[in-house]
Image (cartoon, rainbow, N blue to C red):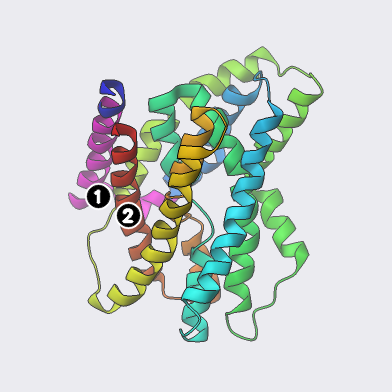
Amino acid sequence: MDGFNQQFIYSILIIGLGYLLKETKIIKESDGEGLGRVIFNLTLPSLIIVTFHDIVIEPSLFLLVIAAILAGFLFVYIGLFVFRNEQKSTRGMLLMMIPGYNVGLFAYPLVEGIWGAEGIKYFGMFDVGNAFIVFGLSYLMGSFYASEETKITSKEITLKLVKSIPLMTYMIVFLLNIVHVPLPNVLIDTASIISGANMPLSLLLLGIYLNFTFHKEYLRLVGKFIFARFGVGLLIGIPLFLWLPVDLMFRYTLLIALILPTSMSLLPYAVEFGYDKKFVGTVSNITMLLSFFLIWIIINL
């Protein structure tokens, strides 16, 4: 457990550094958009290449892809019940937010530091299913409850999935792995160097986006969202962790994945569909802090 706690301390220090750089105006919060694009389109795909290019993909790991997709639909169903009395636009915003998880930018740096490549392998498989939820189901929910002028087609969802460089990297690397086509050593070596920046840059970005401002008018909705997302997540995750007859890393993946923060893609969606950007940002910050705290407790139990 000392190694786990050490990783959390390092993570907190780097997140704190990102927050300090923002508060002292050395870095602007708007700079985080560019940094996020670098992580999402370069360092994260590089980490995926390094982790997955030569692993033995066990059939059981594909259950994590299915689990992520099932969890997404389950939480939308729960959200339809919990948020049934909210106004249409508010209900749409909450249903857009509830199913997807921030795996790439939040979970990966922690998992990489605690479990290394083995942890990334498991969470990476979960993230494949999560990508379909974030870029498909979340987008669909947000669009459906938005203004009447907003239309959505299967073509739009497909294009969003295809444009996701991490998801496409997963798919290509998996396919090459299955058909036993090796990647060039120069590509792997280059990706290995670049991937080393993923963890510190991701943690810095979390600090840059960290915000402790909380609007009191959001209190009721945030409470309902936290109950639906984290309460149910723990209610499902804990029994699965205790009783599911699979290996320990598989069970850790499910338990931790179910209490990860909301996806970083929600803010662009909120802008596109005309939802409350401040609320989405507030929930993102609260879920990030709560998730960090819960993961620390789980790891130390």
Residue span colored magenta = 6-33
Q: Is residue 10 magenta?
A: yes
Residue located farthest toward the top when viewing the structure as drawn: 185
Frontmost residue, 252 versus 20: 252
To which residue does mark 2 refer?
Answer: 29
To which residue does mark 1 refer?
Answer: 22
The amino acid type of the residue labelled 2 equals Glu
Number of labels in the image equals 2
Q: What element carries label 1?
A: helix
Q: How crowded is mark 1: few (under 14 residues within 10 Å), some or many (20 or more)?
A: many
- In the displayed structure, would residue 239 be above or below residue 174? below
Res. 267 mark: none
**Picture coordinates of residue 243 (x, y %)?**
50, 39
- In the displayed structure, would residue 98 be above or below residue 8? below
Residue 125, picture quadrant: top right
Q: Answer whether residue 67 is visible to the viewer in this image.
A: yes
Q: Which residue shows up at 57% across the image and 36% down it?
A: 124
Q: Answer whether residue 271 is visible to the viewer in this image.
A: no
Q: Earlier in the sequence, mark 1 or mark 2?
A: 1
Q: Quadrant of the N terminus?
A: top left
Q: Which residue shows up at 57% across the image and 80% down it?
A: 146
